[in-house]
Image: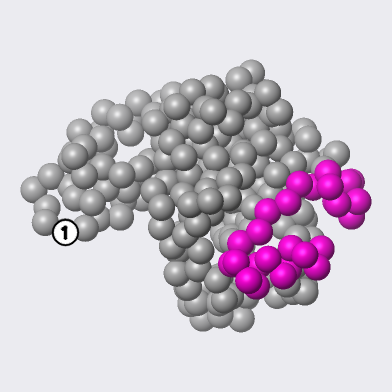
Amino acid sequence: MENLKKELQEKGYTFFKMQDYPQFEEEYQYFKKYICNSETNLLNIIASVRADGHYLKNSPKFVHKNIGFNINETLETFEQIEHKFNTETLPHIDFESFNQYWYYGQNVDINNDFKKLINKIVLKLYGEESQNLSDLMFLSYYKKGCFLKPHRDGKSGTRICAILIYLNDEDYNTEWGGNIIFEGTETVAPIYGNIAVLDFKEGNCLHEVQEVIGGYGRYAILDFVSLVDSNNTPDSY
């Protein structure tokens, strides 16, 4: 994987297919059980909605809104969470300044399972052992209308990288959107087997996620990986 490490250093990002690397063959087969499509998906672990807008009505300030709901108390399904978001949150947002939104969720068992793959990727690309790492991991789901505008994340504490493990079935049509684009040129489709890595040790690449315009939505595990010896490891993204 020397070519991938070189790309990380030179570009600030890289991407690869697990099935192209023999050392990931076992993981490629194992994690197939999490593949998402229109009938089988991970929406049952969705717990909250993230919305970003420039302004809330009657407010002159820039806002970065992360709206979470306790799924264990009052909400049981993705549909209930979506309804609460649409009825209690969106009416307060100025749509002329509205930028993006998506859904995300966490599940301890699933996170711990994917952490094994994350640790292996970080070890191969950065030489860091798992005991030195801290994770901020969740499932992200972009339905129709969701997107991520072009931006640079910048550096935060001792964050090493962000890793995207795509989970869409091979029937996913890339024309439906949800593809990540690096520096306006290189595109990675959200299909299972594809993994994208953004470097934050030295890099700060421009990236975006195309608006989802069709299909059953874009699924991915997203993990922000930091060193555990930091006093300011980010607790949000």
Amino acid of disc 1: Lys
Q: Main secondary structure of the magenta part?
A: helix
Q: Is residue 76 visible?
A: no
Q: Nearer the viewer, residue 49 or 220?
A: 220
The residue positioned farthest toward the top in the image shown: 39
Residue topped by disc 1:
61
As for residue 15 lying within the magenta part, the answer is yes
Answer with left or right where residue 112 lies relative to residue 107: right
Q: Is residue 79 visible?
A: yes
Residue 228, percent from left and from top:
62, 75
Q: What segment carries the magenta color?
A: 1-26
Total labels drawn: 1
Q: In which quadrant of the rendered view does residue 94 lie?
A: top left
Up-down relation of residue 5 to residue 231 (above or below):
above
Residue 129, percent from left and from top:
77, 72
Residue 162, percent from left and from top:
59, 60
